[in-house]
Amino acid sequence: MFKAFAIDTSFITNYGIKTFNDFVNGQKIQVMDKDGLWRKATVRRFNMDDMQQITFKKGDITKTVDCSIDHKWILDNGIITKYLTKGQKLYPFAHGMYYNISTTEKKVTYDQISQQWQVLDVRIINSNGIACCVEEPITHSFCLEGNIVTLDCY
């Protein structure tokens, strides 16, 4: 089974914050990896049955992500897991930096942050449809909107 996200999932690309719906299967793009570097990647689309809905929290911000049940994540201690549980913390993007896109100035800035994304809830959902991911062959990582670090399709 491929590791993938719902088609409406937003992630960081060289075109700005986009959803998988903005790209076609096989399209070549660049994504921001776990260390804050731009990496070449290929968008992939799959048929997906059941998915999991994960709610993350960082400070006062919550974000919900729908992904395959066996999607892989990097925990803050560097361990890779398919099974997130409440309270676990994700790998900190670029070792604690935060990526900002300025649409007016067309530049990228990094701000120091101290908080990490923490798992608030995980539940199984029925989702018969298209799921997507990217293949990033160097670190096998990329960042969802909000600098949520995740691993690629494989």
Image: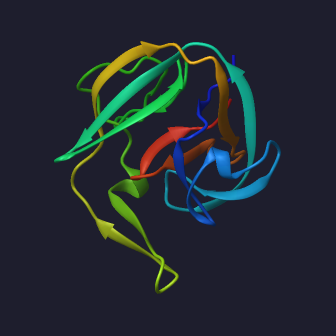
Give the percent coordinates (x, y) of residue 148.
42, 45
Instruction: Name which residue lies at 80% across and 51% down.
Output: 27
The foreground one among 152 and 9 is 9
Colour option used = rainbow
Give the percent coordinates (x, y) of residue 111.
31, 69
Res. 45 image quadrant: top right
Query: Residue lying furthest bottom in this view?
Result: 105
Give the percent coordinates (x, y) of residue 24.
78, 47
Is 11 placed above or below 124 here? below
Instruction: Name which residue lies at 62% across and 37% down.
Output: 152
Instruction: Name which residue lies at 68% across and 42% down.
Output: 134
The foreground one among 132 and 127 is 127
Instruction: Name which residue lies at 50% across and 39% down.
Output: 150
Is 143 placed above or below 81 here? below
Give the percent coordinates (x, y) of residue 69.
52, 16
Q: Quadrant of the C terminus?
A: top right
Res. 13 image quadrant: bottom right
> Across the whole image, how many numbered discs are drawn on residues?
0
Left or right: 5, with 119 as reference point: right
Query: Residue lying furthest right in this view?
Result: 26
Q: Quadrant of the N terminus?
A: top right
Left or right: 97, with 6 as reference point: left
Left or right: 151, with 93 as reference point: right
Left or right: 63, with 40 as reference point: left
